[in-house]
Amino acid sequence: MADERFDEEPQSSNERQRAEKEAPFDGEAPSNPRNERSGADEEVSDASGDDQVDAGSSPEGEASTEDVKLGDPDFGGAERSETGESAEAEFDLDALDFEPEINDPLADAERERDSYLEALQHLQADFENYKKRVLRQQSELGAAGSRNLVTKLLPALDTLTLALAHATSESGSDEVASVLSQISAAFVEVLAKEGLEVIEPLGKRFNPEEAEAVAHEDGDGEPTVSEVFRVGYRWHGQTLRPAMVKVTGS
């Protein structure tokens, strides 16, 4: 019995192999690990080949071609490089010439000082001119006031002069004449210190700027003052009141 089992098992194994060989092909090949590994290798190689083809048409490939063109003198690569270098050189020169504006506190303070100093100098000059103008106006006002005062005192001086002349002509009035003479002399002296001067045209050529002819007598020679009816005066060199005189001559 055991021998018979042993004989049947090999037969069954052989039969299975024979049956597999003789079985019809239904479209699917039996799987073989070695064949599957070789097919995967072929797919990997095909994929790498496709990647290389795509890399040739990719932007990186175009960039490499452009690099070749830029470096090739036939494509103007040298000229483009020189133009770029000249532009960079001009840019560097402009950068060197550029001077940034920096606020200097010391310079600002000096400008402000100079501005204040100039304004102060103008103000000082204006003030000096103002003082001179005020002093001149005060002097002119003082001189005008003194002139007006002396002009008002001249009639009183004329009265003293007439009284003195009358007292001198009258007999027995020597003391009165002496007193009037002293008063008149003191009066004239005070006014003379202030700038009053007596015009004395008697016996001199007639000057219409200092004398007023109220009488005329024919005679030989140039016109000459022969008599004074009223005394004339000058004030600081200017005629304050012309003298009234009689002129003799042609």
Image (cartoon, grey):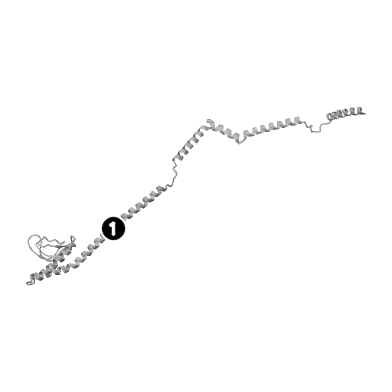
Q: Is any part of residue 242 visible from this angle?
A: no
> Tag 1: Cα neighbours inside 10 Å, few (<14), some, or many (≥20)?
few
Q: Is any part of residue 182 visible from this angle?
A: yes
Q: Position of residue 130 (x, y in %)?
A: 29, 58
Pick whichever, 132 or 238, lies toward us.
132
Compared to residue 211, the image places residue 58 above or below, namely: above
Relative placement, left or right, of 173 versus 15 is left
Q: In terms of image quadrants, where is residue 94? A: top left
Q: Residue sitting at 40 percent across and 47 percent down?
A: 106
Task: State which quarter of the image contains the C terminus.
Answer: bottom left
Pick whichever, 181 or 130, lies toward us.
181
Q: In terms of image quadrants, where is residue 40? A: top right
The residue furthest right is 1
Q: Residue sitting at 23 percent across and 64 percent down?
A: 145
Relative placement, left or right, of 184 versus 40 is left
How many discs appear? 1
Compared to residue 140, the image places residue 3 above or below, namely: above
Q: Position of residue 132 (x, y in %)?
A: 27, 57
Q: Position of residue 183 (x, y in %)?
A: 14, 68
To which residue does mark 1 refer? Answer: 131
Pick whichever, 243 or 153, lies toward us.
153
Q: Residue sitting at 29 percent across and 56 percent down?
A: 129
Compared to residue 200, the image places residue 45 above or below, namely: above
What amino acid is found at the position of numbered circle 1 in the picture? Lys
Task: State which quarter of the image contains the N terminus.
Answer: top right
Q: In terms of image quadrants, where is residue 236? A: bottom left
Q: Secondary structure at mark 1?
A: helix
Pick whichever, 240 or 213, lies toward us.
240
Q: Position of residue 171 (x, y in %)?
A: 6, 72
